[in-house]
Image: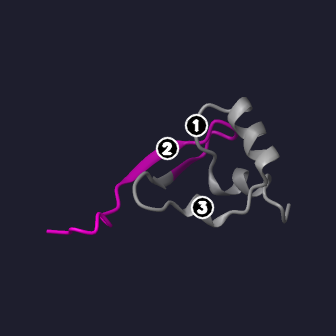
Amino acid sequence: MDTNNTERIFEQKKCPKCGQTFVCSASVRCWCFEYDVPPENMEIIQETYDGCLCPECLKLYTRQA
């Protein structure tokens, strides 16, 4: 039994921007936390899209883009 709650649950999602399917780790820490998205861009994402963006689309909103 895992008492640390580190079990990952993977969920297949569809990007609302491009329609691409991708895998999201809906538990623990997802890959998207590795992206540096400024607060103002995160606000744009939340106001514009219903759901998570795929890795390629999320990259467009990072500080490095």
- Indicate left or right for 35 with 40 as reference: left
Q: Position of residue 19 (x, y in %)?
A: 62, 39
Secondary structure at badge 1 equals loop
Q: Which residue is mark 2?
A: 13
Label 2 Cα neighbours within 10 Å, binned few <14 / some 14-19 / many ≥20? some
Label 2 element class: strand
Residue type at tag 3: Phe
Residue under the point 67% across and 33% down: 49
Q: Nearer the viewer, residue 11 or 32?
A: 32
Camera-side mark, 3 or 1: 3
Rounded to the nearest angstrom, the CA distance separating label 3 from label 1 is: 15 Å
Q: Which mark is residue 33?
A: 3
Q: Is residue 8 left or right of residue 38?
A: left
Q: Foreground mark, 1 or 2?
A: 1
Which stretch appears magenta?
Answer: 1-22
Residue at which label 1 appears: 51
* Mark earlier in primary sequence (1, 2): 2
Q: Residue at horizontal 59%, vertical 43%?
A: 52
**Residue drawn at (79%, 52%) of the image:** 61
Residue type at numbered disc 1: Gly
Measuring from the top left, give residue 29's x and y in whole percent.
47, 62
Mark 2–mark 3 Cα distance, whole angstroms, equals 16 Å
In the picture, which quadrant includes the N terminus? Answer: bottom left
Task: Bin the neighbour count of mark 1 within 10 Å (Cα to Cα): few under 14, some 14-19, many 20 and up.
Answer: few
Q: Are marks 1 and 2 in contact (CB under 8 Å)?
A: yes
